[in-house]
Amino acid sequence: MKTFFKAPRTHGDEEHQLQVACVRWFNYQYPMLRGCLIAVPNGGRRDAVTGARLKAEGVTAGVADLILFQRRGRSGALLVEMKTAKGRQSPEQKQWQTVIEAQGYQYEVCRSLNDFMRIINGYITGSK
C-alpha cells in the first residue's frame, strides 16, 4: 500500500505561496494593470559566482518583494514586503523601508491575502 503525503512546508514555501496567491488575485482583479506589479527576485540560495554577478548588476539587500508601478498622490509606486504571520523584517529590509519612505514611496508589510487585497484596493482607490 502506497502512502502519499505532502512534504512539510518550509518558511520560504509559505511566503512563496502567499505571494503567488496575491499576484494571481491582483492580475484577476486589475487586468488593466497587468505588468505593473512586478516581483523582485532578491531571495533564494545562489552560488558565490551568481551572487557576485547579481550584486554587480545592482541587486540590493532588503528590497521589497513586490513593486506596483502606479502613481497615487505623492507616491510614485507601492512597495510590498511579503511576510508570514510570524515572519519578521531583516535589518536590511527595515533600512531599505526607511530610505524608500523618505523618498515619498508607500511601503507596506503584507501577512495574508486579505492584507494584500486591503492594501492594494486602498492604494488604488486612494483611501490609504
Image (tube, rainbow, N blue to C red):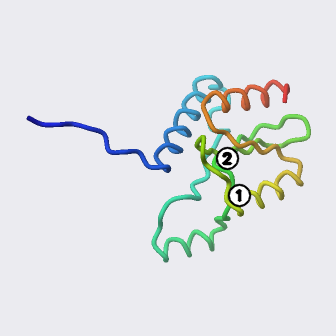
Rendered image quadrant of residue 80: top right
Q: Nearer the viewer, residue 5 or 20?
A: 5
Residue, x 78% and y 45% (percent of image)?
Answer: 107
> Where is residue 72 drawn, in percent x and y?
85, 34
Instruction: State left or right for residue 82 relative to residue 45.
Output: right
Is residue 62 shown above or below 88? below
The disc, 2 or 1, on the residue closer to the chain's N-terminal end is 2
Horizontal side of residue 127 vs 4, given as left or right: right
In the displayed structure, 54 sits above or below 20; it is: below
Residue sitting at x 61%, y 34%: 112
In the rendered view, tell whether residue 44 sits above or below residue 112: below
> How far across and down, in percent of the image, does residue 14 sit?
49, 43
What is the x, y in percent for residue 36? 67, 38
Q: Quadrant of the N terminus?
A: top left
**How many residues crowd around disc 2 within 10 Å: few (fewer than 14), some, or many (20 or more)?**
some
Q: Disc 2 marks which residue? A: 81
Classify mark 1: helix, strand or loop. helix
Residue in view at x 67 percent, y 31 percent: 115
Label 2 SS? strand
Residue identifier under label 1: 93
Quarter of the rendering containing residue 124: top right
- The residue under label 2 is which amino acid type? Glu
Q: Is 27 displayed left or right of 4 in the figure? A: right
Q: Is residue 104 left or right of residue 11?
A: right
The amino acid type of the residue labelled 1 equals Gln
Crowding near pointer 1: few (<14 within 10 Å), some, many (20+)?
A: some
Disc 2 and disc 1 in contact, CB within 8 angstroms:
yes
- Residue 125 in percent (x, y) is at 81, 24
